[in-house]
Image (spheres, rainbow, N blue to C red):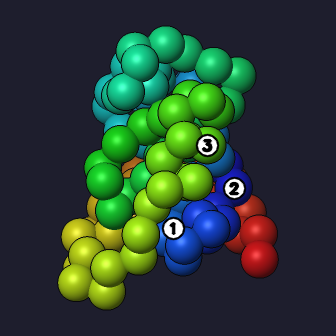
Amino acid sequence: MKKFKSDCGYIVYETTPRECIEITNGFGICDMCAKTDKVIYLVPVLNHAFCQKCYDDWNGRAIFYEDDLWFEEFYARIWEDMAKRKKIDLVEIR
């Protein structure tokens, strides 16, 4: 699992569908189009999983709002704790 920042500055996790399932207890599919992909992007500020196409669409129009940071930090902490419990390596990309 890789952690990086979106173009506007929000935290994003790049995962495999399997990692997505284990971390979120979800289905490993995109919340926007309901398709799966080789890579699933988890966006804590939205509590959403995206395929590549939907992530690129969101990333191109997302606007950073400082008021949303508490929500982002809440889900980032949950997902990182779950990754640690499931022994999923987290690599930070800057």
Against 43, residue 18 (above or below) is above
Q: Mark 2 = which residue?
A: 2
Kindly report which numbered mark, 2 or 1, lies closer to the viewer in this rendering. Answer: 1
> Judging from the image, what secondary structure is the residue with disc 1 in?
strand
Q: Residues within 10 Å of mark 3 (few under 14, many from 20)?
A: some
Q: Which mark, by number, is residue 56? A: 3
Kindly report which numbered mark, 3 or 1, lies closer to the viewer in this rendering. Answer: 3
Mark 3 and mark 1: span between their CA atoms? 14 Å
Q: Residues within 10 Å of mark 2 (few under 14, many from 20)?
A: some
In the current view of this chain or complex, which residue is farthest to the bottom?
A: 66
Please state which amino acid type lies under the numbered disc 1.
Answer: Ile
Q: Quick check: marks 3 and 2 in contact, CB under 8 Å?
A: no
In the current view of this chain or complex, which residue is farthest to the front?
A: 61
Please tell me which residue lies in front, 87 or 37: 37
> Judging from the image, what secondary structure is the residue with disc 2 in?
strand
Please state which amino acid type lies under the numbered disc 3.
Answer: Asp
Q: Quick check: marks 3 and 1 in contact, CB under 8 Å?
A: no
Res. 92 visible in picture: yes
Please state which amino acid type lies under the numbered disc 2.
Answer: Lys
Q: Quadrant of residue 45?
A: bottom left
Q: Quick check: marks 2 and 1 in contact, CB under 8 Å?
A: no
Mark 3 and mark 2: span between their CA atoms? 16 Å
Q: Mark 1 = which residue?
A: 11
Kindly identify the residue that appears in the image at 62 percent across and 68 percent down: 7
